[in-house]
Image: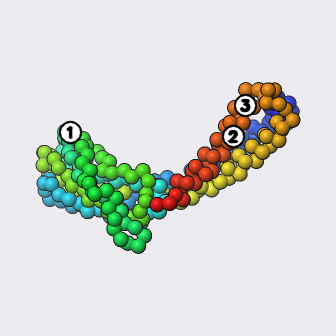
Amino acid sequence: MRLYTLSKRHFVLVFVVFFICFGLTIFIGIAGPNVIKTTTTSELTNSSKLKSYPLNSQPLSTYNQQLWLTCVVELDPPYESRFKINITLSIKIHGVTKDASTRYKNNQVHNRTRQLNCARKCDEIIVAHLGYLNYTQYNILVSFEGLEKLMVPIMNINFTWKTYNPYFSQVEIWFRFVFVVLTFIVTCLFAHSLRKFSMRDWGIEQKWMSILLPLLLLYNGILKYALFYRVS
């Protein structure tokens, strides 16, 4: 292996380059854009009866990657003691295409049971989560059943849309592109250094590296970019 024949100067240089790259990634992570982008919508209500809330998401793209919808129930007045109740959420999702026409993502109504933990303010609960985005906008109709069990009136319900920040996705793509190029260069140099040796003479390190480098090339390249540029 090349590692066993490195001089002291080259050995130190390898570690210096490693720590420089490591520090650079930490700096970009701190100074870079936020990972999650949030948008909050408040729905005022004067009763705890069953009510439907039509919600429209912001315009989306493949750079948003995923979509979450959460809600927080605020009580009026805040309740001092902590209590728990089970509520049922009825969710219907519509997907809006690029030409502003609405198509059903799923015609059926999804019913989900959530446990609501309340005190001065109820804990945040997940209403819906879309792992991939096929439409440029989503219209979600949310209905609550079981809120009448609350001991105090509801002041309002805060809905929050959460997606990946598009700027973060672009930074991630450029990072992966740089690592694809570096991995390709390292793979070529590694293959060139072993071309004069028979596979029988390879050590366990060379055999594993010959497997891991192509897999790393696929992970940072085609497999990841397909998530952003797949056909809807």
- 32 vs 97: above or below: above
Q: Estimate how packed mark 1 is, as few (under 14), some (14 to 19) or many (20 or more) residues with alpha carbons within 10 Å.
A: few
For mark 2, what is the residue? 213
Residue type, numbered disc 2 = Leu
Q: Where does residue 229 sit, x and y in percent of width and height?
A: 54, 59
For mark 1, what is the residue? 84
Q: What whole-number distance in Å separates the C-alpha atoms at marks 3 and 2?
A: 10 Å
Give me the residue at 75% from left, 37% from top: 15
Q: Where does residue 33 sit, x and y in percent of width and height?
A: 53, 56
Q: Nearer the viewer, residue 121 or 98?
A: 98
Callout 3: SS? helix
Choose top left, top right, bottom left or bottom right for residue 12.
Answer: top right
Q: Nearer the viewer, residue 86 or 42?
A: 86
The mark that comes first in sequence, 3 or 2, is: 3
Q: Where does residue 24 sit, x and y in percent of width and height?
A: 66, 48
Callout 2: SS? helix
Give me the residue at 25% from left, 43% from top: 114
Task: Check the image and name the residue furthest to the bottom.
Answer: 99
Q: Which mark is residue 207?
A: 3
Judge depth for marks 1 and 3 and give the one in front.
Answer: 3
Q: Estimate how packed mark 2 is, as few (under 14), some (14 to 19) or many (20 or more) residues with alpha carbons within 10 Å.
A: some
